[in-house]
Image (spheres, rainbow, N blue to C red):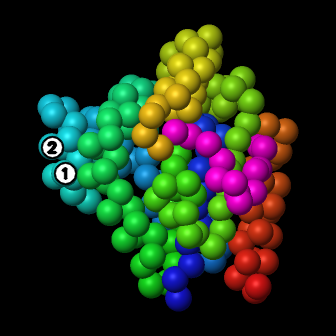
């Protein structure tokens, strides 16, 4: 069975948590595509060469979830050559037998426009900054909020594959939702599409 769930949204919107929960609930493979960009950034050197030589081992680095890695990833993600080098890997993963959930910034619009389910997960910048700050356990809230605003501007303003909801995506605003409620809504959507 080929069944792709494409989940997009800005940093700390809850898309990763929802993606992992969906993968577990429905027995689908999961790919956090942001890790690809974080790994490229943290390898250092020429980002295009790093993207072309990326290996599964690179995705196991302990520092990929740091604030620094996130900032660095958004800087290399604006490079069209880096994005092109990682596109084929993501598309192959998405159409694997048994189905897959991918989360990122351009899954439903660029990587998998044919996905059976498309979600755009969002939340207010303040909510997302608070989540990121608490998750990282470093920095101060004002700095993290400024980083969220700057990252949003880079992600939505880049020329190649800007962050936006696919026209046929279901928008899920998690600002005032518990994670359980957000996951329940996403599961109901996937379940309905699998039955339909």
Q: Secondary structure at mark 2?
A: helix
Q: In the image, residue 131 lies at what x, y percent?
A: 65, 32
Is residue 5 in sight in this rendering?
yes
Say which residue label 2 marks: 49
Q: In the image, residue 172 lies at what x, y percent?
A: 77, 50
Asked whether the residues under the numbered discs 2 and 1 touch, taking CB atoms below 8 Å apart as contact, a structural biologist would say yes
- What is the CA distance from the residue labelled 2 to the residue labelled 1? 5 Å
Q: Residues within 10 Å of mark 1 (few under 14, many from 20)?
A: some
How many numbered circles are shown? 2
Give me the residue at 56% from left, 32% from top: 156
Q: Secondary structure at mark 1?
A: helix
**Observer-nearest residue: 187 or 117?**
117
Q: Quadrant of the C terminus?
A: bottom right
**Observer-nearest residue: 183 or 94?**
94
Is residue 134 in sight in this rendering?
no
Give me the residue at 16% from left, 52% from top: 53
Q: In the drawing, does residue 55 fall left or right of residue 94?
A: left
Residue 150 in the image: above or below residue 127: above
Q: In the drawing, does residue 12 fall left or right of residue 99?
A: right
Tell whether position 3 is magenta. no
Give me the residue at 27% from left, 35% from top: 42
Stretch of the chain drawn in magenta = 162-174
Say which residue label 1 marks: 52
Which mark, residue 77? none
Q: In the drawing, does residue 26 fall left or right of residue 154?
A: right
Q: Main secondary structure of the magenta part?
A: loop
Residue 95 in the image: above or below residue 149: below
Q: In the image, residue 36 lies at what x, y percent?
A: 35, 49
The answer to which image quadrant residue 61 occupies is top left
């Amino acid at each position: 069975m080929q069944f792709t769930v494409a989940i997009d949204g800005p940093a700390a919107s809850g898309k990763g948590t929802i993606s992992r929960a969906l993968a577990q609930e429905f027995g689908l493979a999961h790919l956090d595509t942001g890790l690809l960009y974080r790994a490229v950034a943290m390898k250092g050197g020429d980002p295009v060469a790093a993207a072309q030589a990326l290996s599964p081992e690179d995705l196991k680095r302990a520092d990929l979830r740091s604030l620094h890695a996130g900032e660095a990833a958004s800087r290399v993600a604006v490079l069209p050559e880096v994005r092109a080098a990682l596109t084929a890997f993501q598309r192959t993963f998405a159409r694997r037998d048994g189905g897959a959930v991918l989360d990122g910034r351009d899954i439903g619009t660029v990587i998998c426009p044919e996905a059976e389910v498309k979600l755009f997960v969002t939340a207010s910048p303040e909510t997302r900054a608070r989540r990121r700050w608490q998750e990282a356990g470093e920095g101060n809230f004002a700095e993290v909020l400024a980083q969220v605003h700057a990252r949003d501007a880079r992600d939505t303003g880049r020329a190649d594959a800007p962050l936006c909801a696919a026209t046929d995506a279901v928008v899920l605003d998690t600002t005032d939702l518990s994670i359980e409620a957000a996951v329940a809504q996403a599961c109901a959507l996937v379940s309905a599409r699998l039955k339909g």
